[in-house]
């Protein structure tokens, strides 16, 4: 099994491939295909307690787990996977310390990394109709990555509770499952039956960061409004 696993990893493409390619395919956010490469989210794979630093692996549900960050395209195929942080790590921390974040930042060093990552407006009960529409369209894209995680876990049930020993081997196994998922047929799934995980809430953003992020959202919000006629 290990020989097959490492063979799959050797043959899989790197994140550079999709960062540099020009995609003309249908996009997860309608009518703004040129602005979006994929949908990102995190999930947990429950594991047995590691020998070292076991408390770090306890997630918010009280399980020992590994954090998996994934980016998928509109076909629910992984275009980037980052694995290895313990279950207690927040999604935003994992992203900020991932090669994906560093690669995007290095490609355009004059801009902050959040330029490449769009999240919904915070709903304080007073969102305008265009902002609510923006959140709705963004959420429709987020469902893609939720489905992708659900599909790979249903295909490889070990990912619900992986009993392999050693964090390094666990990471290789999870990534190999993602590679095999990309080779499989997606038509054997009923997406309505795939469970969706509760999203994590990031409460660490300061007022200045929030204002800058809202400005970026406003630009995209206007773009959506220009392209969607059902406002």
Image: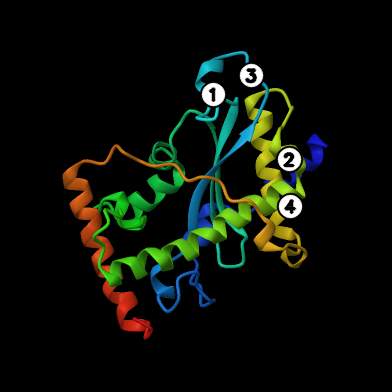
For label 4, the crowd category at 10 Å Cα-Cα, with few meaning under 14, some 14 to 19 and many 20 or more, is some
What residue is at 49 percent from the left and 59 percent from the top? 142
Q: Is residue 12 above or below residue 191?
A: above
Indicate which label's residue lies in the foreground, 4 or 1: 1
Instruction: Estimate the spatial distance between the alpha carbons at disc 2 and disc 4, rounded to whole Å.
Output: 12 Å
Q: Position of residue 173 (x, y in %)?
A: 70, 38
Mark with earlier residue (2, 4):
2
Quadrant in which residue 5 is drawn: top right
Q: Is residue 52 above or below residue 157?
A: above
Image position of 95 (left or right of 159): left
Instruction: Estimate the spatial distance between the alpha carbons at disc 2 and disc 1, rounded to whole Å.
Output: 28 Å
Secondary structure, mark 4, is helix
Secondary structure, mark 1, is loop
Q: Position of residue 218 (x, y in %)?
A: 24, 66
Mark with earlier residue (2, 1):
2
Quadrant in which residue 73 is drawn: bottom right
| CB contact under 8 Å: marks 2 and 4 | no
Q: Which residue is mark 4?
A: 180
Mark with earlier residue (3, 1):
3
Whether residue 168 is visible, yes or no, is yes
Mark with earlier residue (2, 3):
2
Q: Is residue 230 above or below residue 110?
A: below
For label 3, the crowd category at 10 Å Cα-Cα, with few meaning under 14, some 14 to 19 and many 20 or more, is some
Q: Is residue 75 above or below residue 154?
A: below
Return the mark for residue 6.
2
Residue 139 versus residue 209: which sits nearer the camera? 139
Quadrant in which residue 62 is drawn: top right
Q: Position of residue 119 (x, y in %)?
A: 36, 55
Q: Which residue is mark 3?
A: 49
């Amino acid at each position: 099994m290990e020989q097959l696993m490492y063979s799959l990893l050797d043959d899989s493409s790197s994140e550079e491939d999709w960062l540099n390619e020009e995609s003309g395919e249908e996009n997860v956010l309608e009518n703004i295909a040129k602005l979006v490469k994929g949908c990102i989210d995190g999930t947990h794979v429950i594991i047995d307690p590691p020998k070292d630093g076991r408390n770090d692996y306890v997630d918010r549900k009280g399980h020992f787990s590994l954090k998996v960050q994934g980016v998928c395209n509109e076909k629910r195929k992984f275009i980037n996977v980052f694995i290895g942080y313990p279950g207690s790590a927040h999604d935003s921390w994992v992203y900020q310390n991932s090669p994906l974040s560093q690669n995007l930042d290095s490609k355009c060093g004059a801009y902050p990394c959040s330029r490449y990552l769009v999240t919904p407006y915070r709903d304080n009960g007073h969102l305008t109709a265009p902002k609510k529409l923006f959140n709705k369209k963004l959420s429709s894209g987020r469902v893609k990555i939720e489905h992708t995680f659900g599909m790979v876990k249903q295909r490889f049930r070990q990912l619900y509770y992986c009993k392999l020993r050693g964090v390094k081997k666990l990471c290789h196994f999870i990534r190999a499952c993602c590679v095999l998922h990309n080779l499989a047929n997606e038509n054997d799934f009923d997406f309505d039956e795939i469970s969706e995980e509760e999203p994590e809430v990031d409460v660490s953003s300061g007022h200045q960061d929030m204002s800058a992020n809202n400005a970026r959202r406003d630009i995209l919000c206007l773009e959506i409004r220009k392209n969607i006629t059902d406002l």
